[in-house]
Amino acid sequence: MLAIRNLSVAFPGPEGPVRVVDDVSVEVGRGESLGIVGESGSGKSMLSLATIGLLPKSARTSGGILLEGRNILTMGEKELCGLRGRRIGMIFQEPMTALNPAMTAGQQIAEGIRLHHGTGRAEARAEALRLLDRVRIPDPARRIDSYPHEMSGGQRQRVGIAIALALKPDLLIADEPTTALDVTVQKEILDILDELVADLGLSLILISHDLGVIARSTDRTLVMCRGRAVEDGPTEAVLRNPTAQYTRDLIAALPRRARAGLGEPGLGEEARLAAGGTP
């Protein structure tokens, strides 16, 4: 479905262009979940912004990002606007800054529906209410008129997921969707994403620095370091038998119990939970 081919992204620097994504290639099949993992500054989020056509104007790109054969990097803004939401949905890292503080949850979900489909106000509100229920917002009939500052972090993230789902995209990109959430809420958000992938047949790109999240929710894993792809393969194989020294170092940096949740034998259920796994 999505094929990233030799993608490089560079920005001007005092000593010449600085590559933040360097010759990365990876594919995502229909209905497949790909995890992208690496430390801060490894290029994960920049890769996702390139995929949805949201790079800063100063960025210089080479290579290709092919969505069913069409190169996103060569699209104009009008074509990109038709792509965003309809074909590719995005859940941003920090919902408090991603959401509009002057609009209610319902208005923000309904906005894209009305803009892209020409839907009437009442019909778009009804769909927004359905989506709030779908992402497990408590008391959605009341929360639909709440502003972001009136919601908890987990509720705001659910609204962000509902916005990303509103136009029924084929591919969902989730950029650090569990950042700054407590462990219980993290699990609830990941459960929702798992259900959406299974029920709607979505392809998923899940970006995280948390190996436990990646182990729990993805079929394949791409490991990035300093803008480059250092390892790519089935998640279980990458985390249990890594070939790249950087991947081994990431795993070694985890507490012993968390490493067990990634595949080391003998520490059982408690360890899987420590690494973010399901009970």
Image: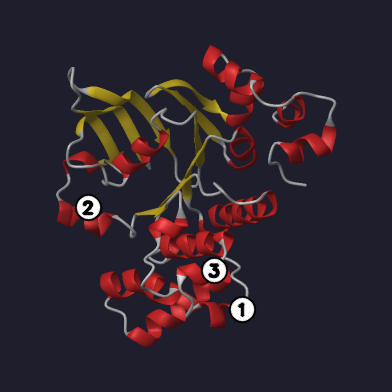
From the image, state whether disc 2 or disc 3 is nearer to you: 3
Q: Residue at x 17, y 19 (%)?
A: 16
How far apart, in angstroms, are the residues tagged by discs 3 and 1?
A: 12 Å
Q: Residue at x 33, y 72 (%)?
A: 111
Helix, strand or loop for disc 1: loop
Residue 80's disc is: 2
Query: Which quadrant holds the N terminus?
Result: top left
Q: Within 10 angstroms of label 2, few (less than 14), some, or many (20 or more) residues?
A: some
Residue 151's disc is: 3
Picture quadrant of residue 142: bottom right
Residue 21's disc is: none
Residue highlighted by disc 1? 139
* Chain-order first, disc 1 or disc 2: 2
Helix, strand or loop for disc 2: helix
Inspect the image, locate mark 2, and give the three-letter code of the amino acid beneath it. Answer: Leu
Inspect the image, locate mark 1, and give the three-letter code of the amino acid beneath it. Answer: Asp
How far apart, in angstroms, are the residues tagged by discs 2 and 3?
A: 31 Å
**Percent x, y for residue 84?**
30, 55
The reply to whether residue 60 is visible in this rendering is yes
- The one of 233 and 174 positioned closer to us in this rendering: 174
Model colouring = secondary structure
> In this rendering, would 254 be left or right of 156?
right
The reply to whether callout 3 and callout 1 are in contact (CB within 8 Å) is no
